[in-house]
Amino acid sequence: PGFILPPSERTAIRQYWSTKNAARRRRKAEAARGLCGLMNLGNTCYMNAALQCLGNCPPLSQFFRHGLETFVRWHMMTRGRTSKTEMAKTLGWLVREQWDGCSVRVNPSRVLEQAAV
């Protein structure tokens, strides 16, 4: 017969591989975040490419996901509501949808509408 491990060692080995597999699954899930497509709204493929680049630039995606509210509050107090704050909020929504949303693709029509203002 083969070598049989005592139950305590079998449990330790199972826990090790379970932890290792969980860490691997977390890394894969993190790598998949931000891989969210944008719907083409006619002739918006170049806009979508630019938005994908902005959303996947780490400093910008961090800003839009975590620092935007502070910027908008500061901008509103010092300069009031402007089209820049509205565009920043819209881009923040898009980046959060790309990174934290559950959808495979996002409709960027809000960004297109805001850009037309």
Image (spheres, rainbow, N blue to C red):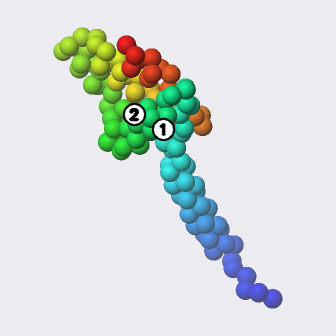
Residue with the mark numbered 2: 65
The image shows residue 98, relative to residue 58, as above or below, that is above
Q: Report whether 87 appears left or right of 21.
A: left
Q: Which mark is residue 44?
A: none
The image shows residue 26, relative to residue 43, as above or below, that is below
Query: In which quadrant of the rendered view does residue 53 lie?
Result: top left
Residue 95 visible from this viewpoint: no
Farthest residue toward the left? 78
Query: In which quadrant of the rendered view does residue 87 lie?
Result: top left
Question: Percent from the top left, x then y, of residue 102?
Answer: 58, 35
- Secondary element at image label 2: helix
Question: Percent from the top left, x then y, of residue 115?
Answer: 39, 20
Farthest residue toward the front? 43
Cβ atoms under marks 1 and 2 closer than 8 Å: yes
Q: Earlier in the sequence, mark 1 or mark 2?
A: 2
Few, some or many residues within 10 Å of mark 2 (<14, 14–19, 20+): many
The image shows residue 56, relative to residue 101, as above or below, that is below
Is 22 or 78 nearer to us in this picture? 78
Query: In which quadrant of the rendered view does residue 76 lie?
Result: top left
Residue plotted at (49% across, 34% down):
45
Residue 17 visible from this viewpoint: yes
Q: Report whether 62 appears left or right of 29.
A: left
**Amino acid type at mark 2:** Arg
- Secondary element at image label 1: helix
Residue plotted at (55% across, 26% down):
42
Is 46 or 16 nearer to us in this picture? 46
Residue with the mark numbered 1: 99
Residue plotted at (58% across, 55% down):
25
**Amino acid type at mark 1:** Trp
The image shows residue 7, relative to residue 78, as above or below, that is below
